[in-house]
Amino acid sequence: MNNHTLHYLDYIVIVITLFIALFYGKYFSKKQTSTDAYYAGGRNLPPWAVGISILATLISSITFLAYPGEGFKSNWILLVQAIMVVVVLSGLVWFVVPLYRKVIGISAYEYFEKRFGPFARFYSSAAFTLTHFSKMGSVFFLLALALSSMTGVNTYLIIWVVGFVIIYIALKGGMEAIVWLDVLQGFMLIGGGLISIIIILFSVNGGPAAIINYAVEHDKIGFGPYDWDLTKLTFIVMVFNGIFYGIQKYGTDQTIVQRYLTTKTEKGAIKAALTGVFLSLPVWALFMFIGTALYSYYNLSGETLPANINPDAVFPYFIMTRLPPGVTGLVLSALLAAAISSLDADLNCLSAIAVDDYYARFKPQSSDSQRLRFGRIIILISGIAALLIASLYVFTGSEGVLGIVFGLYAIFSGGIAGIFLLGIFSRHANKHGLYTAIVVCILFTAYAVLTSTKINGSRVLDLGEWNFRHHSYMLGVYTHLIIIVVGYFASFFFKSDVPHSDLTIYAWWEKMRNNRKQ
């Protein structure tokens, strides 16, 4: 990116950040004597801390770089997704949190089994595992590339040093260490963003007013285009995508659902969930605004950017060229914190699924200490595998073949939010109806992916006018809708199945009605 090198103060700040993370893992390691402590923090963590932990997990290093990049090159359309998440969770949390605290032990996908049978649990847990495993490799890869280009430090060295810290925290400290470290890193993340935006706003003549006015004049603050066009990234596409993203993230994602179990009371868990999502929206907006402000800054200040710079690289370039020594280290530490807080949670949750959905099932007589030992082995293996994937990405220069492989995984893991919605809103939907819907969903996803993916300029499968032409964000929406519609109507053909209506929202409403009468 440039020949700028870090000041020794910046290195000191970054090293201190990494050592603090290691300290948290070591400090809480003594308490990790059971699977309940390791995966649920002893179910006694304060709601405010869990809420900030949810925030820190949602704001990854990709967000730290991608949102400013999008704000710089376009407008705030990606923020529509975050707004819809707030809307969805505000209505969903009152039922979802009590449901999971009542029905499951550790894995969110235990509910899927109780509602629709073992296959639903395996399908959904495998989907989560594949999705997050591929995400971990990508996050390591993009973080290392960004830090390497900003600091000149070897990319592989960054991957393995940061990776070691993350694996150590997850391996030794368990969920309690992750939550409390997330609290610190959440404040670092917000602080890094605030420091950056303040410096940007006061670095031009006219200050904040000039920055904002220029952005408004050039249509950088808005959520359009507002056309009813599902083939492009439009407002309506982001609304649909945001609704199902919110349902999937807060209703089916192990990294979030597992947090619901870490507080002492149901009310505390609801408070934590609301805290996390309501804090996420302004933080997402903050990083989007950083990109918008950078657009104004580089047009008003006379400062020039390198030719053909990628929009995602503008914020890192500003960090390295305009921030004073020490402050640069703080912002880079916030970038590191965003990665650590997301990836350590992923490792813990992948381990929880491996133990609860698979090991405990196939070894029901195993002791809690054996399950804990197996869980730690899974963390170690998963962490090292993610680092190897990231290293391979660096070696090949892109996601390459692995990116295609993970894309194929998506074909066989769609519609998870649809399964959840079908389970809670339909009293007669049953497992064979759902299984039929999953088959249809897989076939549709395969069609959409193969007819919209191009390799060397040609579609993998070209059906002419019948190719899938809608925006890729709509594919996820359609898979959920297919599960709901096909699953609902197919269930009428399997009336012998027991639908388990006690696990629907109607049973919850009945309980609430009875409580009010008492």
Image (tube, helix red, strand yellow):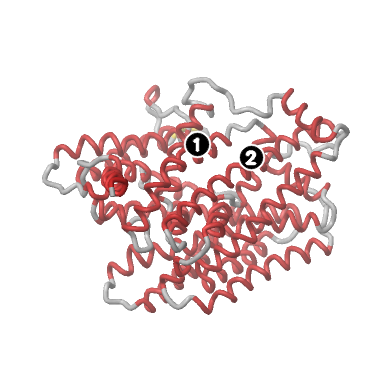
Depth order, front residue of 29/43: 43
Residue at the image position 41 percent from the left and 72 percent from the top? 35
Depth order, front residue of 506/38: 506
Residue bearing the label numbered 1: 84
Asked if the residues shown at circle 1 and circle 2 are in contact, with their CB atoms under 8 angstroms apart, the answer is: no
Depth order, front residue of 444/197: 197
| Residue reaching furthest to the front | 518
Residue at the image position 11 percent from the left and 46 percent from the top? 496
| Category of crowding for the residue at label 2, using alpha-carbon neighbours closer than 10 angstroms: few (below 14), some (14–19), many (at least 20) | some
The amino acid type, in three-letter code, at marker 1 is Met
**Which numbered marker is on residue 53?**
none
The amino acid type, in three-letter code, at marker 2 is Ala
Q: Is residue 417 above or below residue 72?
A: below
Q: Is residue 504 visible?
A: no
Residue 67, quarter of the rendered image: top right
Residue at the image position 21 percent from the left and 45 percent from the top? 430
Q: Is residue 261 visible?
A: yes
Residue bearing the label numbered 2: 285
